[in-house]
Image: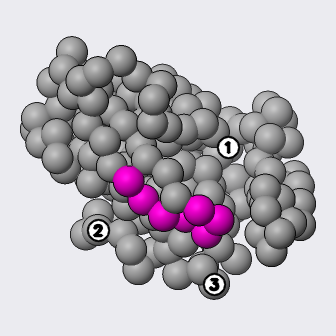
Amino acid sequence: MSKHGMVESADALGERTARAADAVQRLTRWHDDFPNPGVRFADLTPVFADAEGFHSVIDCLGACAPDADLVAGVDARGFLLGAGVATTLGTGVIAVRKAGKLPPPVHSRDYTLEYGSAALEIPADGIDLRGRKVLLLDDVLATGGTLAAAAGLFAAAGAEVVAAAVVLELSFLDGRSRQGDYPLTSIVRL
């Protein structure tokens, strides 16, 4: 699908989402007490390694904002998603990096997550983000700090997050409540 593709029917969208959700539910590996005690880690690596599963996830995420002109993937598994969706939509892709991975100048935002705190960065020059329509992607939405921080980075740079999407949402952690006014899609909600 390109950003100039036809509008898809509700049935086709439902089938696409069902295929992606099935792959996520079948292939996700769960690890208790990782990376810290009390955290249950969702490893989506098997989903991404499965050609059909990965393709269905990319198609599903790309349908969230077909008019986006830039796709942003959050460090690190979001990089895989962002590149795949950007290729599908015919747009560029930008990596939202962990602090210290980009040369200055950068836009930086601190945030908290379920097992600590961190910071995210995007370039402050070299890419004109003003007025860009960004589709923001990450693998898992837990407490919501990472996705909200990434959205804040783009707002600070003058871009508009037109939608955000994740593969897996852990709804019991209420991360959705920390998000902005943009539409938020998750393929699987637990």
Q: CA distance from mark 1 to mark 3?
A: 25 Å
**Which quadrant of the view contains residue 25?**
bottom right
Q: Earlier in the sequence, mark 2 or mark 3?
A: 3
Distance of label 2 from label 3 (alpha carbons): 18 Å
**Drawn side of residue 115 relative to residue 79, left or right:** right
Q: Which residue is nearer to you in this view: 26 or 12?
A: 26
Kind of residue at badge 3: Phe
Binning the other alpha carbons within 10 Å of mark 3 as few (below 14), some (14 to 19) or many (20 upward) gives few
Q: Secondary structure at mark 1?
A: helix
Q: Measured from the top left, where is residue 135 in percent x and y?
A: 36, 45
Distance between the alpha carbons at the discs numbered 1 and 2? 27 Å
Q: Is residue 10 visible?
A: no
Which label sits in the foreground, 1 or 3?
Answer: 3
Report if the CB atoms under discs 1 and 2 are less than 8 Å apart: no
User: Which label belongs to residue 29?
Assistant: none
Of badges 1 and 2, nearer the viewer stands 2
Query: Residue 180: which numbered mark, if any?
Result: 2
Name the kind of residue labelled 2 in the image.
Gly
Q: Secondary structure at mark 3?
A: helix
- Say which residue appears at 70% left-offset and 77% top-offset: 190
Task: Describe residue 70's horizontal placement relative to residue 130 as left or right.
Answer: right
Main SS type for the magenta part? strand
Q: Which residue is mark 1?
A: 56
Query: Which residue appears at 19% of the width and 20% of the height?
Result: 125
**Mark 2 crowd level (few <14, some 14–19, many ≥20, 10 Å Cα):** some
Location of mark 3 (residue): 172
The residue stretch that appears in magenta: 110-116
Task: Check residue 9 for magenta coloring.
Answer: no
What residue is shown at x 36% (from left), y 18% (from top)? 103
- Specify the amino acid type for callout 1: Ser
Looking at the image, how many numbered discs can be counted on the residues? 3
